[in-house]
Every structure is written in C-alpha cells, then in structure tokens.
Image (cartoon, grey):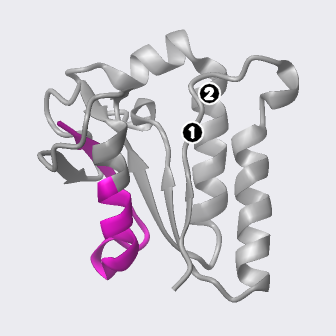
C-alpha cells in the first residue's frame, strides 16, 4: 500500500499561493487515479468545523485566516468529489510537543475543548487511519 500524506500550511503568504491547497488536491487526485492508488489521508484545518463552540473554530478561522479557510474548503471538496478513499483530519492548533499517543478523535466534529495537539500525535493518527478502513470518506477532528 502506498500512502500520501499532506499537511496544510498555516497561512499563504503570497497571492500566488492563495489556491495552493486546491491545486495540490487536484494534482494529487489525478496522479493517484492515474497510478491506481486510492487511499489518501489529508490534514486539513479545524476552522472548517462550523459547530465548534469551544473553541469557536469556524468564526475564528473566517475572521483571522479567510484565505486559508477558503482554500482548505476547496481542497476538501476536490477530494470529496473524487473516487479516492480519503480521510480528512482536522486538528486545531499544532504544537511541537512530543508524541503522547493520548489524543481524542471525533467523527464529523472537533473534540470538545480541543484547542491543541502535537504534530507527532496527528502523524500517529494519520498513519493508523491509512490502514483503518472505518475512516474512509470521513472527516475527523483530533485534539489532545
């Protein structure tokens, strides 16, 4: 099995990067279908959870990072409309803290009071998700 993993950048710095995630999704989808690789686990942004009250992810994302939210949303749409076996992982603020293996996952929502998570814990979940067929074509929130 081949696994492609992608991590979303914090915020595009130049206007040329405004649609970078959407372009990435299109290129990767095309390449994967061409090579007959179906499984992809993609890191997106928690700002896309509209029902998250604590933290108010959607509101904060729209106010502070409107370009990133729009681009991540477009990226997710490309994968959702594809024939790939995708999983979208939406973490909140990423930290450089070490791996703990102690994280919470919630399908379709950010875990309650999910403010931060280490990159190492996100990576651990993504590797496990690649082999777990129960998360195919699902969006999951993850936090410590």
Left or right of 13: which side holds 99? left
x and y, in percent, of residue 12 in the image: 70, 23
**Res. 52 visible in picture:** no
x and y, in percent, of residue 45 in the image: 46, 36
Whether 99 is among the magenta residues is: no
Residue at 43% over, 70% down:
137
Establish if 23 lies above or below 36: above
In the image as oriented, which residue stretches furthest toward the front?
98
**Mark 2 packing: few (<14 Cα in 10 Å), some, or many (20+)?**
many
Residue at 59% over, 76% down:
84
Label 1 sits on residue? 8
Figure label count: 2
Label 2 sits on residue? 68
In the image as oriented, which residue stretches furthest toward the right?
16
State the residue in front, 9 or 19: 9
**Res. 114 visible in picture:** yes
x and y, in percent, of residue 82 in the image: 65, 72
Left or right of 19: which side holds 59? left
Q: Which mark is residue 101?
A: none
Q: In the picture, which quadrant includes the C terminus?
A: top left
Left or right of 78: which side holds 112? left
Residue at 79% over, 84% down:
34
Given contact means CB atoms under 8 Å apart, are the residues at marks 1 and 2 in contact? yes
Residue at 67% over, 36% down:
71
**Mark 1 packing: few (<14 Cα in 10 Å), some, or many (20+)?**
some
Q: Quadrant of residue 60 in the image?
A: top left
Question: What is the secondary structure assignment of the residue under circle 1?
Answer: loop
Q: Quadrant of residue 35 in the image?
A: bottom right
């Amino acid at each position: 099995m081949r696994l492609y993993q992608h991590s979303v950048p914090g915020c595009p710095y130049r206007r040329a990067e405004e649609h970078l995630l959407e372009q990435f999704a299109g290129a990767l989808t095309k390449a994967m279908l061409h090579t007959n690789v179906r499984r992809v686990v993609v890191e997106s942004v928690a700002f896309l959870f509209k029902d998250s009250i604590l933290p108010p992810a959607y509101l904060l994302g729209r106010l502070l990072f409107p370009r990133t939210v729009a681009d991540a949303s477009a990226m997710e749409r490309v994968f959702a409309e594809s024939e790939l076996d995708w999983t979208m992982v939406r973490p909140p603020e990423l930290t450089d803290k070490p791996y703990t293996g102690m994280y919470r996952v919630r399908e379709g929502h950010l875990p309650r009071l999910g403010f931060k998570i280490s990159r190492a814990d996100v990576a651990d979940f993504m590797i496990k998700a690649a082999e777990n067929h129960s998360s195919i074509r699902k969006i999951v929130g993850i936090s410590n």
